[in-house]
Amino acid sequence: TSDEVVDCSHGKQLWELCKEKYEPLWLKGGNHCDLEQYPEYIRHLKKFISTVEKSPSQRYSS
């Protein structure tokens, strides 16, 4: 939430546009290039990737 490169509002707007909602993670004090230093970020990212791999997707259908 302390990103000086990309404002947090951009992430919130992208989340609002998602068809399949996933619980967002807003890290208080997180900056643009230090998210890997937050253990909760790594846990959330792994959970997200696992969920995406398991869910059916129409990304590649035409």
Image (spheres, helix red, strand yellow):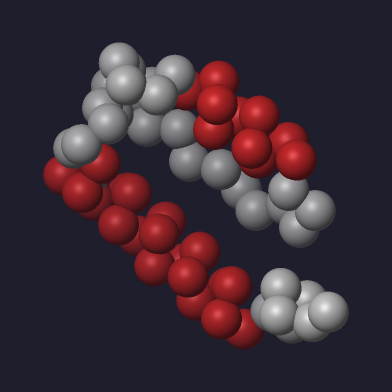
Residue 47, x across and y down, in percent: 46, 67
Q: Quadrant of the N terminus?
A: top left
49 horizontally vs 33: left or right = right
Residue at 42 percent across and 56 percent down: it is 44
Residue 7: image quadrant is top left
Instruction: Work out whether 13 lies above or below 40.
Output: above
Q: Nearer the viewer, residue 3 or 27?
A: 3
| Residue 57, visible in the rendered structure | no
Residue 58, x across and y down, in percent: 78, 76
Residue at 27 percent across and 31 percent down: it is 32
Instruction: Work out whether 3 lies above or below 59.
Output: above
Residue at 37 percent across and 32 percent down: it is 27
Residue 37: image quadrant is top left
Instruction: Work out whether 54 lies above or below 8.
Output: below
Residue at 47 percent across and 70 percent down: it is 49
Residue 5: image quadrant is top left
17 horizontally vs 28: left or right = right
| Residue 9, visible in the rendered structure | yes
Residue 25, x across and y down, in percent: 48, 41
Please give the count of numbered marks on the rendered protein. Answer: 0
Residue 36, x across and y down, in percent: 21, 49
Q: Quadrant of the C terminus?
A: bottom right
44 horizontally vs 48: left or right = left
